[in-house]
Amino acid sequence: MLAPAVIEAQGSADLVLTNGRIYTVDNARPEASALAVRAGRVEFVGSDAEARVLAGSSTVVIDLHGATVVPGIVDAHAHLLGLGNTLQRVNLVGSTSYDEVVNRVKAWAKDVKPGVWIQGRGWDQNLWPTKDFPTHEALSRAFPNNPVVLTRVDGHALVANAKAMEFAHVTATTADPSGGRIVRLASGAPSGVFVDNAKSLIDRTIPAATRADNRKAILAAVAEANRWGLTGIHDAGEDAETIGIYEELAKAGSYNLRNYVMLSDPGEPDSPTALRNPYIQRGPQSALYDGHLWIRAIKLYADGALGSRGAALLAPYSDEPSNSGLLVSKPEHIEAWAEAALRRGFQVNVHAIGDRGNRIVLDSFDSALKKVPKADHRFRIEHAQVLSPDDIPRFARLGVIPSMQATHQTSDMGWAESRVGPQRIRGAYAWRSLLNTGVVIPNGTDFPVEQVNPLLTFHAAVTRQDPSNQPAGGWYPEQKMTREEALQSITIWPAYAGFQESVMGSLSPGKYADFVILDRDIMHVPDAEILGTRVVSTWIGGKRVYEAK
């Protein structure tokens, strides 16, 4: 208990929670029943009797009636503006056929005027009876007068109709760009599908959203994140204009999120484009606007995605022997930024999914660290999805953090082994193999690629099962996390991966009072009941930002 003199000096708490089951993710006090908050920070964690001592006449006291409290949940790899845009476009997630995709677009766009662009996201040909990429014909017949662009669920491919390709001046003579592929019909004409860097041939033709549009989308995405218990995210690649909107909202006190922002690839380190980037010029920024924005990381891309066969593999795809994937960036570019970032104090986080993509990034980091040795750099590989067994120990040896997404495993497990075969799959989604080397794994969803709900992440991490609890026993169950690890992977491990562990990630005195109240105990309910849990309320800095109706 705090001494009376200390209590008097500190004043009363602003908020006291009692009669709960609080998981602190703090080894000094792993569980407690009460929590006190003052000036946006945790003041005390302990027993009900002690916490009540801190309650004064103006203190808000909440009886939790046995509800569970966990630290504020952080998604360590997400796309905030992407989520906001998705909320305003055709939702194609879960479509079980190309016909269903076209019909969903028809229903959504029934009042759209001719000539107006129609956009959607979420199709996945692996869920269809035929697993082949679609072609534009059905979409072109349905929309002869509107350009239509539908992005694949992973964001690494799109299908465009004839009108969109006409606007983009894409024809049979258009060459594949470096790091991209135009899927073609037997005649050589574009099929409508554009993979990785080839997407830009279409994307650059789409009218840019206005600043007001983006601001509205961002606010909608923040509210959606809060609804699912998120108090923070790591925003995996945004441009200067988008980050400027974040700053504007945070400065005005209208940004209910702690966002660790990664700058989208700024170009070569010493290029005019990079040097003119205001956030490169400013240098690393931490805990801006009362801890709502961190801008100190750079996001690069090594390869594409496994679902669209753009992930770079050391050997050809098992289900497409003529293809070994795509390198989206040259290895020299990754190494140059790793070296520059070490000198300038930035973190580098590189998207790598295939075993070749991951090896290239590890090699690049290794080379840069030999030239500019630095302790505690916390460089990251985003996804680290398919790894050669030889490369798994290199993360710990180099101090590289594998930032992974548990629900990618449950979404991909139906077809991933057909892509890489029974041997390479052993190094895919290999959480336990990595954890056994001593690294931590910050967990995320990559939303809008996967659903926002972090309880899906927690469930997948501990069961290796989809939301219907299949397959029985889990998919390659030897790679499961424990519940303690799974909770750390959405709280303290993202905090560490963002250099934030001194101020967030656990309910420890002095840290931000970010927490989530849940209606059941996710640390003890049976596996099959985890996803029945609902978020009661979400709190950031002791302020309630979401409450269930």
Image (cartoon, rainbow, N blue to C red):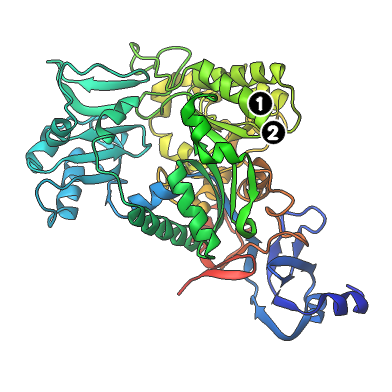
The image shows residue 436, relative to residue 468, as above or below, that is above
Q: Mark 2: which secondary structure?
A: loop
Q: For the residue marked with disc 2, what is the amino acid?
A: Val
83 or 106, which lies in front? 83
Q: Position of residue 42 (x, y in %)?
A: 73, 65
Q: How many marks?
A: 2
426 or 197, which lies in front? 197
What is the quadrant of the C terminus in the image? bottom left
According to the image, label 1 marks what residue? Answer: 395
According to the image, label 2 marks what residue? Answer: 439
Question: Residue 49 appears in which quarter of the rendering?
Answer: bottom right
Are the residues tagged 2 and 1 within 8 Å (C-beta)?
Answer: yes
Q: Position of residue 224 (x, y in %)?
A: 44, 59
Distance, label 2 to label 1, CA atoms, is 7 Å
Q: Residue at x 57, y 25 (%)?
A: 337
The image shows residue 245, relative to residue 240, as above or below, that is below
Q: Position of residue 511 (x, y in %)?
A: 73, 59
What is the quadrant of the N terminus in the image? bottom right
Q: Residue at x 61, y 41 (%)?
A: 442
Question: Residue 396 appears in which quarter of the rendering?
Answer: top right
Q: Position of residue 68 (x, y in %)?
A: 63, 66
User: In the picture provided, is 355 more to the left or to the right than 478?
Assistant: left
Q: For the residue marked with disc 1, what is the amino acid?
A: Phe
Q: Mark 1: which secondary structure?
A: helix
Disc 2: CA contacts within 10 A as few (<14), some (14-19) or many (>=20): some
